[in-house]
Image (spheres, rainbow, N blue to C red):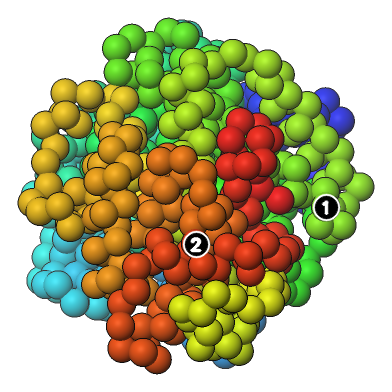
Amino acid sequence: MRNHEIPAGHFAALAAGDGDAATVRLLRTAEYSGQLLRLRALLDARPPLDRDAYDLLAAAQAHAPGRVVDVLLYPHVTAWSAACLRRSRSAEAAGPDLAHFANVAVAAGIRAGLSFTAPAVVRDGMVGLPSLGRAEVGPSGGAGTATVRCAAGSVEISTADARVAVPADPRTDAPGWRGLRRLSVTAGGSTLDVHLDDLDPYRDNHRLGPADRLDDAAADAWRRTLDGAWRFIADDDPGRAAAMAAGLNALVPLATRGGRGGRRGLSATSTDAFGAVAITRPRDALLFAESLVHEFQHVKLCSLLGSVPLYADGPGERHYSPWRDDPRPLGGLLQGAYAYLGVTAFWGRRRGRLTGGDAAYGEYAFALWREQTAYAIGRLPASGRLTEAGERFVAGMRASLDRWADVPLPAAARRRAESTAADHALVWRLRNLRPDPDEVRRAAARWPSADPGPAFAAASLLPADVRPGTPGARSDLRALSLRDPAAFARLAAPGESSELAADLAQVRGRHDAAVASYRALIAAEPERPEPWAGLALSLLGRGRDDAATALAARPEVVAAVYLRIVQDDGISPDPVEVARWLAPAVRGDVPSGAPRWDASERRRGDVAVE
């Protein structure tokens, strides 16, 4: 086994957000070395891996090494081994998971074409064979051991109560057998061949909730949508398509979640599962393509970080990330910036080739992610924790993004993007920043005198306790208004004080109606951040005054003082008047890593963050 270095040309290509098929194969080779090291360590663990299973794996490798590589590098096999190794080094028992090694070895033996008889673990009434499928041999919750017999290409899995014959093509279903489906799509000279994995017991690397077994109609819908997405990617960027074809191995369907049209849905990757993307059912090919580009950026960067440290870990430092609801460590900010560097390039290439509502949405998405990515990349060097390689990498990211800097955009797309960026920053501040409670108490005690008191000091970051990916209703509505204007026009809300009514009014530019609705929402639930952010945007849309300025600059202070007045005095004052009253006291600095949004500062349009 050898150390893996990334040649300068491949490193530069990755830094630019690119990297061809050869680059990805280099990363894959490094991942395989890491997997072998983990298995070697698990052989020495307590308890160790089963030696008979290891011997079967070794025999398979001697007979058909390429097929064994495919099994050992299957994303949920690498995720399994990484989880076992972590547990073996902690107080958490790794024994039950280590037993899955028998099933890994059996899968390798089958794929290598060996003749053998070996045990396999029964888990929840099933025998899962990674990269092949699943045999159902007992009731739900059942555990134990099954016997696998493989001879002359015939595979049988049996227990005392069941006998399952694996079909010659294990991708197909048979009595007692659920085959692991593969999706194959071709466009622009590149073929993407991936598993649609709704079976593997180790596929839920993020605890996001995998979907259960898909029926044939659902699987066909995935295939059709993937075909359309792949055409977008391969037609726009053949080099990216070739790289994805070399490295993308499995799609893991996540349980479907709600939300209005226009968002990408939920998707994720794992450092432990190279080549896998977990994703909710794609709504359409265009957004599916965006998600695949986004997540494959994570796949590449996670793998690169295993060979080349780009930053030094540091305790406590957290940053505003323009696509997350929680403060992020430096590594998280780097990951997000890299993913959206790829997304920006995707929309930059695709935007001029779209029609109808998709064309307007493409301009908006390009404007939004170009500016948000520029902010994130700009924050990375200021951390002081990039390695020398990290500085070169971030410089490459910046140079790549700069290629899109002068692309002209319609004013409407810029305005929508600025609204979404501001909305996110305002909600983030309200969720994650808390002003000094003594300052809040003193200011609330002065209400409604002429003087709110001295200027507020910088607020403090709260501990990160927000799950990623929380959808923003107004962002959804902005996207829907662009992609499907007719559907957006049909939307109506019951009652002027409902949140949907307020959000619709804000997105439609009916600022007076939005202000009235947000006032009512705040009076009913003053702790919620979304109405406060909506109120700030609506006041700014109406025209700048002291109330709008205060809410744009320090929304967390206005909300905290308002809530304290409610608690102390038992009244619900007008939040607009509280904001106007506080204006002289809310011009203080913000903590490092927190966003500031103030429409009076015109940098990158109407959005300024620092």
**Which residue is outermost to the right?**
388
Determine which quarter of the picture holds residue 292: top left
Determine which quarter of the picture holds residue 240: top right
Question: x and y percent of residue 405 in the render?
Answer: 68, 21
State left or right for residue 92 relative to residue 401: left
Viewer-side residue, 301 vs 129: 301
Residue shown at the point (68%, 72%) measured from the top left:
455
Question: x and y percent of residue 452 in the render?
Answer: 58, 76
Viewer-side residue, 43 vs 370: 370
Residue shown at the point (71%, 19%) measured from the top left:
403
Residue shown at the point (24%, 63%) measured from the top left:
520
Residue shown at the point (30%, 83%) measured from the top left:
571
Give the CA distance from mark 2 to mark 1: 34 Å
Figure check: 346 above or below 203:
above
Q: Secondary structure at mark 1?
A: helix
Whether label 2 touches label 1, CB < 8 Å: no
Figure check: 179 above or below 442:
above
Disc 1 residue type? Ala
Question: x and y percent of residue 320 in the render?
Answer: 62, 57
Task: Say if residue 359 shows up in the picture.
Answer: yes
Determine which quarter of the picture holds residue 479: top left
Q: Which residue is mark 2?
A: 580
Residue 382: give its label: 1
Q: Earlier in the sequence, mark 2 or mark 1?
A: 1
Q: Secondary structure at mark 2?
A: helix
Disc 2 residue type? Arg
